[in-house]
Image (spheres, grey):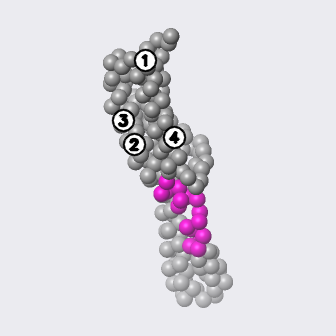
Amino acid sequence: MVEQNCYQERFWKEMVQIKFKLNYIDEYYNESEKIDRYMNIFLAVTTNGSICSWVIWNKLQILWGGIIAVSQFVNAIKSYLPYSTRKKYLFQMSKDVQSLFLLAEKKWYDVAEGLLTENEIHNLTIELREKFLALDNKNSVEFSLPEKQKIMDKATKDTETYFNNFYEG
């Protein structure tokens, strides 16, 4: 038989893991949004700027024509790039995981205060895992989310900050 503290610790670790995943998803979304914004700015500047520049600097027609061609190519393939698909997935996944994390935080009080049996804590921990897996399967049907160390590091830092601020020690 395992001590109740062990079950409490497992629940705690699951709750921390959910918060980490939420932070990771949010950071990934922010990066995808940034790429989208930069791409749109590039397209706007190159298309409009190139037309104006072409008229002013007639001698560099080949350069400006090339810039316009590149911007039209980027515009044509933009919707097929993985970040645009990821944005939709990440937006919905973030909302879903936020709800799951709030459920875990709500249940943490009962777990921490010893109001639940070992079996109840174990079942609650497994339920959180199952719900996360269901959310992940629902939201990521057509692609995977590659791991990015920079985003993982930021998510880890944000998770540590959150728990240090709200659950000292």
Q: Could you say whether the residue bearing mark 1 is in a helix, strand or loop?
A: helix
Report the span colored magenta: 74-89
In this picture, is 126 found above or below 95?
A: above
Q: Which mark is residue 118?
A: 1
Could you tell me residue 115's position as x and y percent? 33, 18
Q: Are marks 2 and 4 in contact (CB under 8 Å)?
A: no
C-alpha distance separating marks 1 and 4: 23 Å
Residue reaching furthest right? 62
C-alpha distance separating marks 3 and 4: 15 Å
- Give the mark nearest the N terminus, 1 or 3: 3
Q: Could you say whether the residue bearing mark 4 is in a helix, strand or loop?
A: helix
Q: Could you say whether the residue bearing mark 2 is in a helix, strand or loop?
A: helix
C-alpha distance separating marks 1 and 3: 19 Å
C-alpha distance separating marks 2 and 3: 9 Å
Q: Is residue 30 magenta?
A: no
Residue type at the position of mark 1: Glu
Q: Is residue 80 magenta?
A: yes
The quarter holding residue 61 reads: bottom right
Q: Which residue is mark 2?
A: 98
- Give the mark nearest the N terminus, 2 or 4: 2
Q: Could you say whether the residue bearing mark 3 is in a helix, strand or loop?
A: helix
**Nearer the viewer's eye, disc 2 or disc 1?**
1
Q: Residue at x 41, y 46 (%)?
A: 96
Q: In terms of depth relative to the viewer, which is nearer, 115 or 92?
A: 115
Q: Is 66 left, or right, of 158 in this rendering?
A: right
- Give the mark nearest the N terminus, 2 or 1: 2
Q: Which residue is mark 3?
A: 103
**Nearer the viewer's eye, disc 2 or disc 4?**
4
Classify the position of the C terminus by image quarter.
top left
Label 3 environment density (alpha carbons within 10 Å; few <14, some 14–19, many ≥20): few
